[in-house]
Image (cartoon, rainbow, N blue to C red):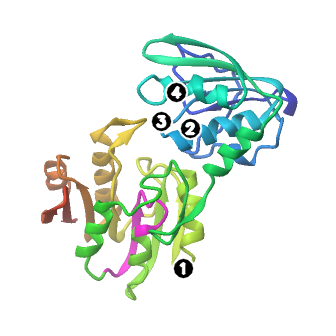
Amino acid sequence: MTEEATTGVYGNPPAELAEVPRGAVQFSPLLPGSAALERRDDASLAAMVMLAPPGTIERRHDVAQALRALQPGGRLTVLAPKDKGGSRLAKELKAFGCDFEETALRHHRICVATRPDDLAAARQAIAEGAPRMVEETGLWSQPGVFSWNRVDPGSALLLKHLPQLSGRGADLGCGVGYLARTVLAMPGVEALTMVDIDRRAVEAAAKNITDPRATIHWADVRKAGSFPENLDFIVMNPPFHDGGAEDRSLGQSFVRRAAESLRKGGRCWLTANRHLPYEDHLKALFSRATLIVEADGFKIYEARK
């Protein structure tokens, strides 16, 4: 496939709503191994099919990156559920100077747009959604990353109750490194593997965490081999949303992987929203699971292998 003929795809658009050509290059930062759209050359894609993310800054940034990467006259097919950004697509494309057609189907808005000649508005949206240092956290981050511009209260509560850890451990769903920064300040920690499914978070974490004891991986925690086993400890604030919808199986899969990866006697420290029912899952997979605290809408557990 030649560079000029390349079509891109972002995310997993429903097949019944948008056709993705065979051989299209995947650019979603949430699919490990995908290409980076922001590093794609200008005017290097013939077309793009995008399932737009729900966050406004993130969505405008990603649509703008797609427009920048399209060849003159290139076509962007972008869609989203109407209650997760789809109802705003037409207005946003108009602001970018695009000619487009809009249809509605199965609770989605689907827009087919042509790359505008003037990319000034798109480049402004790219700058607005770019990585930056966040003053509140003192960490590099980017719109679209979990809790990108604030301290997540669940993680903050976990750090208040985390004991001194030692040995080899992992931070599952590490984000930009908020938990890891404190864990690596503990002198007994020998090594920390950090894993996240979001490439943007991983790249930010690589800027934030330069301790040689840390290794950072762009991977899906749910898949075997995504991080070492026989660990002494694991810390995590597991996700419970997938594509904007609550999915409790995500956190349960994190718990299962933690149980599989700890040595006998190893400990897992977990923070979770109060309404999430992890108790039975923890008790079934660990020899002991203790509720340490319940406060501020969150629960902290220590589970021992």
Residue at label 3? 54
Instruction: Give the Cα distance between marks 4 and 3.
Output: 10 Å
Look at label 3 and name its amino acid. Pro
Residue lying at 82% horizontally and 40% vertically, measured from the top left = 42
Q: Is residue 86 left or right of residue 241?
A: right
Q: Amino acid at mark 1?
A: Asp
Q: Which residue is mark 1?
A: 211
State the image coordinates of residue 191 (x, y, percent, origin top left): 46, 77
What residue sits right under mark 2 in the picture?
Answer: 59
Which amino acid type is shown beneath numbered disc 4?
Arg
Q: Is residue 287 visible?
A: no
Specify whether residue 173 is painted magenta: yes
Q: Earlier in the sequence, mark 2 or mark 4?
A: 2
For label 4, the crowd category at 10 Å Cα-Cα, with few meaning under 14, some 14 to 19 and many 20 or more, is some
Mark 4 or 1, closer to the camera: 4
Q: Which mark is residue 144?
A: none
Q: Which residue is mark 4?
A: 88
Q: Position of residue 194 (x, y in %)?
A: 47, 64
The first of marks 4 and 3 along the sequence is 3
Position of residue 142 relative to residue 22, above or below, is below
Q: Which residues are drawn in magenta?
A: 165-178
